[in-house]
Image (cartoon, rainbow, N blue to C red):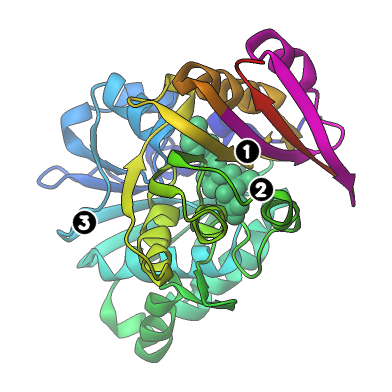
Amino acid sequence: MNASTDNDLLDALFLPITGGELAWPRADRVLFLRAIDGTVLRRFDAETLVCEQSFKPDALQLVRSGLTQTARANESRALVLGRLPRSRNQARALFAQAIHRATNDGVVVAAAANNQGARALQDDLERLAGPATVLSKHKCRVFRVPAHSAHIDAALLNDWMQLDAPYPIGHGLLGRAGVFSADAIDPASQLLAEHLPWNLAGCAADLGAGGGYLAIELVTRNPGIHAIDLYEAEARALEVARLNLPTVQRPLTVGFHWHDVRTGLPSRYDVIISNPPFHHGRADAPELGHGFIIAAANALNPSGQLWLVANRHLPYEAVLGEHFAQVRVVVVRDGFKVIAAQLSW
Ligand SMILES: C[S@@+](CC[C@H](N)C(=O)[O-])C[C@H]1O[C@@H](n2cnc3c(N)ncnc32)[C@H](O)[C@@H]1O
């Protein structure tokens, strides 16, 4: 049988309600953390749901479906739903947030796919809030606890609230649970940084900038670059980049954009760098990289250059060849390739 899909997980998350075990609050709105759109949401009045989503493409989809979407809502709710992330520490931080933001007589419901550690995550929630009521569907597990303060381990709640905070990962940089390369510099990005030239100049952009490592390397090596825009779909990563970029010790104009790069860029650039995203869940998704390459080609000035790094096996050459006049493989090492491309000869 196939692995669970996003829709399967949503069905599981809403099962206590659709199955009649848990009532949808009449007098309050429901808070949905890490919300995504899906068929099951059509069963509820959109007005009664507040969706929180930090990944721009998912946030845009929620808005298109008429759901109230916010990057962060602060009121307490009688029912808090959480779609759990893969990162255990990020999930623990989400549990703490959910408990913190549920009313004292409220309920927290969370779901994860079995092959993404659902059982261990249930154990975590039970450590924090006591025994959970559990249901299973579509190879997913959904568990719920009362958020009543009498059951909560207050010291653990306090500890887990801190797990969403950025922390040092060396080289003067901060990382964050659940953000790309959360604990160390990514080896592919490091390979690109090592091979960036020293004579790039003008206005630059980093596509899928994460915590800003590549952007910092580019501007540190290239004093001719006077401005850089960081484009990143994950707001939690962009918040880390905002903390990391000020370590650059020279005058520089920096822009931070919570943006889906595949929709194109609003400005033009002389230099674009990228370590594009390359998978959805566990599956390779080269079309993501293709979208980044096309966005770069459309946003570069005629003499502009794109420098990117990718896993060696990813098929980017055809799309690069279609959109750029010159494409050069600069180095292939440790399973990665660095490619430089120019629009003109
Ligand atoms: C391979 S990581 C590189 C991160 C960072 N540049 C580094 O070197 O550590 C790709 C980044 O692209 C972001 N991303 C994924 N889809 C995106 C999209 N559609 N638009 C913009 N950024 C996206 C991810 O959140 C991730 O931070």
Q: Residue at x 53, y 26 (%)?
A: 304
Is residue 53 shown left or right of residue 285? Answer: left
Q: Is mark 1 on a helix, strand or loop?
A: loop
* Residue sticking out furthest to the left: 27
Q: What element carries label 3?
A: strand
Q: Nearer the viewer, mark 1 or mark 2?
A: 2
Based on the picture, tell me whether residue 103 belongs to the magenta stretch: no
When asked about the image quadrant of residue 50, the answer is top left
Q: Which of 144 and 304 is in front in this view?
A: 304
**Three-letter residue code for mark 2:** Pro
Measured from the top left, where is residue 194 in percent x and y? 72, 57
Q: Is mark 1 within 8 Å of ligand 1?
A: yes
- Name the disc covering residue 277, or none: 1
When asked about the image quadrant of residue 16, the answer is top left
Q: Which residue is drawn at 34% across and 66% down?
A: 97
Q: Distance between the residues labelled 1 and 3?
A: 37 Å
**Three-letter residue code for mark 1:** Pro
Position of the N terminus, as image quadrant, is top right
Q: Which residue corresponds to mark 2? A: 197
Q: Is mark 2 within 8 Å of ligand 1?
A: no
Q: Residue at x 34, y 41 (%)?
A: 257
Q: Which residue corresponds to mark 3? A: 78
Q: Is mark 3 within 8 Å of ligand 1?
A: no
